[in-house]
Every structure is written in C-alpha cells, then in structure tokens.
Image (cartoon, grey):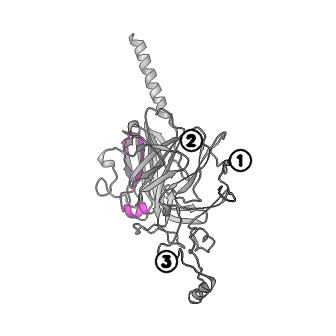
Amino acid sequence: MKLLPRLLVLILVLCAKTAFAQQYVPVVTPNGSTLPYVMKDGVKEFRLTAEQVKREFAPGMIVNAWGYNGSSPGPTIEAVEGDRVRFYVTNKLPERTSVHWHGILLPNGQDGVAGLNQDHIKPGETYVYEFTLRQHGVHMYHPHSDEMVQMAMGMMGFFVVHPKVPEVPKVDRHFVVMLGEWFVEPGTATPNPMVMNDFNLFTFNSRVWPGTDPWVVKKGERVRFSFGNLSMDSHPIHVHGYTFEEVGTDGGVVPKSARRPETTVNVPVGSTRTVELVANVEGDWAFHCHKSHHTMNAMSHDIPNMIGVAQPPALEDKVRSLLPGYMAMGEKGMGDMMEMGLPKNTLPMMTGTGPFGAIEMGGMFTVLKVRAGITSYADPGWYQNPPGTGAHKVDAPPP
C-alpha cells in the first residue's frame, strides 16, 4: 500500500475511534440526575458543591441530608476512558470535607483522603482535582473527611467511566442505583449518624417505596443495572421473573467465562456490582433488597413480640385504662396495622398500592416495568395480565 492511502486509512481509523468515544448510552439515575460538564482546552470540567440538602424520601417525608449540587446522592458523573477530567469542589458545609474517587486509578495526590493525600477543604474553600481516566467501569465518589457523619448524611454519588471502544452487544438502558441506610427518628427530619446497625430507613438513590420511580424498559432491550453500596450492610438485590448475569464490579469487567445466571446479586459494603439481562418478558416485576427489614419503612425495633398473643377487647380495655391510647395489635401479624396514626414526617412501615390492593412494602423496593410497543420511558401504568394468566381464587382444591 502506498504511503498516502495508508495515511488515509489511519486518519479514518482515528476518526472512527474518536466518534465511538462519544457514542455511549448515557446512564439513568432513577430519582436523580447527571452532572453536566464543559470542555476547557481538551479537559472535561465538572463542578461539585458539597452542601446541606433537603431530600424527599417519599411524599410526606422530608429529610435534612447532606449531598452535592442540591441532591443526595449527588449527580452521576459520566466520562469516557482516556478522558482528562477536572473537578472544582466547593465546600458549603458547616465543616471541612474532601472527595475520594472510589475505585478510580489515579495519581496519589488526587485520591482525596484528607490528612493523607491533601489538606481538608475548609468551609468556603474550593479545591481542584485533575487526572486522566485509565479504566472503564462503574465507580463512586464520597468524602474522606469525617466520613462517618458525611456519608451517613447522604454524601455519595456514582462515577461512570464508559469504555473507549463501545461494547458488543450494545446495552440499551443502564440504571445506576445507590443503596443507602439511615436512622431518622419518627417525628424528626435529621438522620442520626451515630447509629451503627439498627437503621430504620433503606433507600434506592435516597428514596423509599412508594417514592421510588419505576424502572421502565422496552421489551427486547438489553438492560444493565449497577448498584453502589456505601452503607454499613451488604444488600442482596433480587429481581422477579428474570435471571441476570454479573458483568462488572468496581474492580472491572467480569470475564465471560466467570459469569453465571443469578436472580440475586449481593452488593458488599464499599463496592459496586453491575448485572445485565435481556428484557424479553412483559410485566411488572418486583426489584428489591431481599433482607426483609430493608423493604420496610420506619419501625420500632424494641417493642414486644405479640404474634400469637390473644388480645380480646376486654383485655385491650384493661390495658387502655393504664396506658391511654393503647391499641391491641400485632397478634396476627403486621399487615393490617398500617391504618394506625403516625408521627409527623415519617412513613408507614409498609405501604404502596397496586392494581390488586396493598403491596405492603417499603424501603429498597421498586418495580421493573417491561412493555412492548412503548415509545417513551414514562411510567406506563400497571401491567394488565392477559385474561386467564393470573393467579385466582377457587372454591376448593380438586379432590
């Protein structure tokens, strides 16, 4: 091949790679947002402001959280492997902070551990971080300065680095979901960061059911879900009606030879896990943490267990004479207890209404809605099962 044609081919290949680098499918952060950037001399420049925010966990409950750019979790950062990125971080918190780029391979001085790699960012100060992205995958960012308080108050976010060369097969839809644990005393609004393991609210992107948006996909799409966990417990995230494969962690891509079908992925503390499926079955499919207390909203954990303890009206009256306002409850389970009154700014332990009545869930719960023929990702409403395909009541089992 002559020199000129070779140069032409090389130029075309470089142009194609450049074009591919811009052709990624943006991730979806349910109930969240993506951080915008501007190009400055070939560098993607982002701005983060650490600040106090008010987060609505579900209609009727507002939490005094901390976060970035007005939200908890903070907006999702997206970039491409090979990008040079720059972050201006401004601290509007009442105390000092820093930002650690969790899982990102970078120079030591950019790692964000205050006191070890850099000075703390004092209130009112702005620091700049800058590095080149050497890998791709789903990572996170969070403070490394008084992190016990700051992460318990909601300061965290995703950092998604897309591959330089698009993956095959292409993923049509990619959701990122941060798993969170909180203790907010009913009747109050500020999380208690001193609680270590007895949490009472469990969130997807700092929202609880029924405040979590449905995850809507079109039938036949290849869908990826990434879960990040900076809480105090692991969370086994389970999907109904499908199996998926774990395709990535915050350490990188899982080799195809190591993948296996699962219906639940355990997300350890300090990790991300990415799973993938092809949405080929229509319906409304539950997607939730499988630790049963994590699909409940605020509850008291130190009340007597009354299951199986009969509380007839006469006994209830006697107890009420000693404890005005006492209500007999819990003797047959808790499913029918949700009509009782609540303190201000809290939520029923289990709630949500579906097409068949009370769903009786809370916390880390939402619905994967798979539909054929939809033209947008707006909530399509409840799925209507084809006639004759649903579970139904019979008078008696056959002999």
Q: Which residue is at the far top?
A: 2
Q: What residue span does the magenta drawing correspond to?
A: 130-152
Residue 86 lies, in percent from the top left, at 41, 44
Specify the amino acid type for callout 3: Pro
Q: Quadrant of the N terminus?
A: top left
Mark 1: few/some/many CA within 10 Å (<14, 14-19, 20+): few
Mark 2: few/some/many CA within 10 Å (<14, 14-19, 20+): many
Residue under pointer 1: 387
Q: Which residue is at the far front?
A: 399
Which one is closest to the eye, mark 1 or mark 2? 1
Q: Which mark is residue 279?
A: 2
Residue 221 lies, in percent from the top left, at 57, 38
- Verify CB contact (< 8 Å) between mark 2 and mark 3: no
Give the SS element for disc 2.
loop
Specify the amino acid type for callout 1: Pro
Specify the amino acid type for callout 2: Ala
Image quarter of residue 360: bottom right
Q: How many marks?
A: 3
Residue under pointer 3: 304
Nearer-N-terminus badge (2/3): 2
Give the SS element for disc 3.
loop
**Front-most of 51 and 391?**
391
**Front-most of 187 and 93?**
187
Residue 386 lies, in percent from the top left, at 69, 46
* Alpha-carbon span between mark 2 and mark 3: 44 Å
Residue 244 lies, in percent from the top left, at 49, 44
Q: Is residue 281 magenta?
A: no
Nearer-N-terminus badge (3/1): 3
